[in-house]
Amino acid sequence: GVLYSIVGSLNMADLAVKVAQAPQKGLLTAVGLVFLVVFGLKGGLFPLYYWLPRSYWAPPAAVAALFGGLLTKVGIYATIRVFTLIFTFDPGFTHTLILAIAGLTMFLGVIGAVSEMDFKRILSYHIISQVGYMVMGLGLFSPLGLAGAIFYIMHHMIVKSCLFLACGATEEVTGTTDLHKMGGVLKTHAGVSWLFLVPALSLAGVPPLSGFFSKFVLVQEGLGQGRYLIVAVSLVVSFLTLFSMLKIFRFVYWGTPPQGGWPRADKRYYKLLLPVASLAGLSVLIGLCPEWFFNLALASARQLMDPAVYVRAVFGS
């Protein structure tokens, strides 16, 4: 409503033109920050992520896979669209603020994951930390930075869904997600154990999986712009992500099964492994053929950095 009162339009292409020409830049910056709060709440950005871990821990694994893989990306998509098309007149303030929020989101999210001892809660906290990488690309505000963000979104949708489904298949065997009550699944159900390890390493950015190349692009652009602090934070978060993934593997899949076996080990969980294997295979495919996927992301990023392309597409030449 405030934005409409200033420029008299809500069409996004029209807004891109009129906001750039509007004299009340201070008020428009305030409106842009309100949008950042709203979309940040949806996407789980610092300090608005308080709702996310418990919300994503509660549903069944299949629902959590859908939510974790897709829904938070709606807020990130909206943030990217608005801050590459409309509120681009003061990137020295708005996008530097976004970069700081990205660093805090990454670090505090992974600290939550490291401190937890529940399979699904760890994965839920990692949604927060990984969202920070996507917003980092927007904060860098360059074609390569945005390409890294888009590439990371593609990677994370696949990997996070795969991890929640692997968690669900494991829960079918053990009957719990409490790490203290699990262990030795590798000896009884090796399939789900190794299928978990692939997306887990990809989430941490281990080559040659999809997570490595998406983070590599962001780190490369951050170093190119001299943003050493955010690069250092992103690397530390990657190591802590690897630590928490190995913690899951150690407590859940390594070790010795309980005496008497698992209470639900007789359930046929093999049908649950098909979607896990498919998504894990996609992560490997993106890691082995990153250039094709990155070129798509880079083409999208170049259009985002040139709002005139979208304006002409809506209004014509």
Image (cartoon, helix red, strand yellow):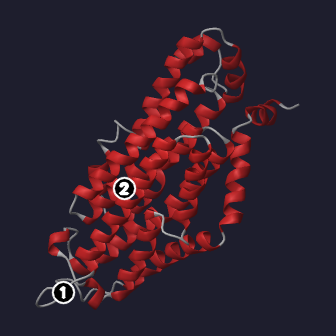
Q: Which mark is residue 128?
A: none
Up/down of 35 relative to 55, above or below: above
Name the image quarter holding the C terminus.
top right
Q: Position of residue 157 (x, y in %)?
A: 50, 59
Q: Which residue is drawn at 22% across and 58% down?
A: 116
52 or 110: which is nearer to us? 110
Within 10 Å of disc 2 (Cα), the crowding (few <14, some 14-19, many 20+) is: many
Q: Which residue is drawn at 34% across and 60% down?
A: 123
Q: Where is residue 85 in the image (x, y as percent from the top left)?
A: 66, 31
Q: Position of residue 173 (x, y in %)?
A: 26, 81
The reply to whether residue 161 is in sight is yes
Up/down of 96 relative to 169, above or below: above
**Residue 41 occupies which quadrant of the picture?**
top left
Element type where label 2 sits in the image: helix
276 or 183: which is nearer to us? 183
Q: State which tag comes first along the sequence, 2 or 1.
A: 2
Up/down of 186 relative to 117, above or below: below
Q: How far apart are marks 2 and 1 (CA)?
A: 27 Å
**Residue 244 occupies which quadrant of the picture?**
bottom left
Residue denoted by label 2? 126
Residue denoted by label 1? 257
The reply to whether residue 67 is in sight is no
Callout 2, which amino acid? His
In this picture, residue 310 sits left or right of residue 130: right
Q: Which residue is drawn at 59% across and 32% down?
A: 82
Up/down of 95 relative to 22, above or below: below
Callout 1, which amino acid? Pro
In this picture, residue 200 sits left or right of residue 31: left
Q: Position of residue 239 (x, y in %)?
A: 38, 60
274 or 76: which is nearer to us? 76
Q: Residue at x 15, y 71 (%)?
A: 180
